[in-house]
Amino acid sequence: MIPWTPALETGHPTIDDDHRKLIASLNELDSALKKGVGKEQVIPLVSFLNRYSREHFAREEAHMTRVNCPSAVANKQAHLDFAAKLDGWLATLQTGASLSLVLEVHRETSRWIGAHIVNVDCKLRGCRLA
């Protein structure tokens, strides 16, 4: 489980709301894994995470550009790289999910999102419209 803490806040309400939803979906996946649910319940959670993260990435990238955030270019590349991983994981899950793959998706996604928010997205704190 990933708790929401002030360390994850960017100071931009829309971006923070998106991050809360992404973390909530990861926590839902965590709960599903602990309950031992089947592939038919895990794939929709990973599909939502894949779809919603892309919607969020687009909003966040547009916002970073709008406020002239110095992290905008690095953020966009990080999003492209992570979206490619999500696509690969989802394709593999749809053809045959193993418990080890589902655990990898959860572990790596949780690690990436937490680190990305703190190390990249939180650089938005100092960026405001002029």
Image (cartoon, rainbow, N blue to C red):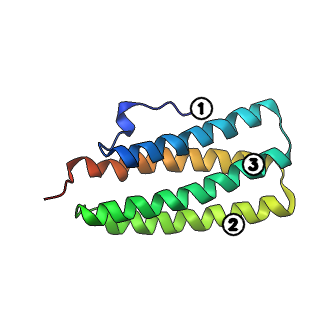
Determine the CA span between mark 3 and mark 2: 12 Å
First-in-chain label (3 vs 2): 2
Query: Could you tell whether 76 is left or right of 23 in the image?
Result: left
Q: Position of residue 109 (x, y in %)?
A: 59, 50
Q: Callout 3 environment at 10 Å: few (<14), some (14 to 19), or many (20+)?
A: many
Residue on which disc 1 sits: 1
Position above or below: 29 against 83: above
Quadrant where the image shows the C terminus:
bottom left
First-in-chain label (1 vs 3): 1
Position above or below: 36 against 129: above
Residue on which disc 3 sits: 102
Q: Position of residue 45 (x, y in %)?
A: 70, 48
Front-most of residues 48 and 116: 48
At horizontal 62% and vertical 58% (from top left) the residue drawn is 50
Amino acid at dot 3: Val
At horizontal 65% and vertical 53% (from top left) the residue drawn is 48
First-in-chain label (1 vs 2): 1
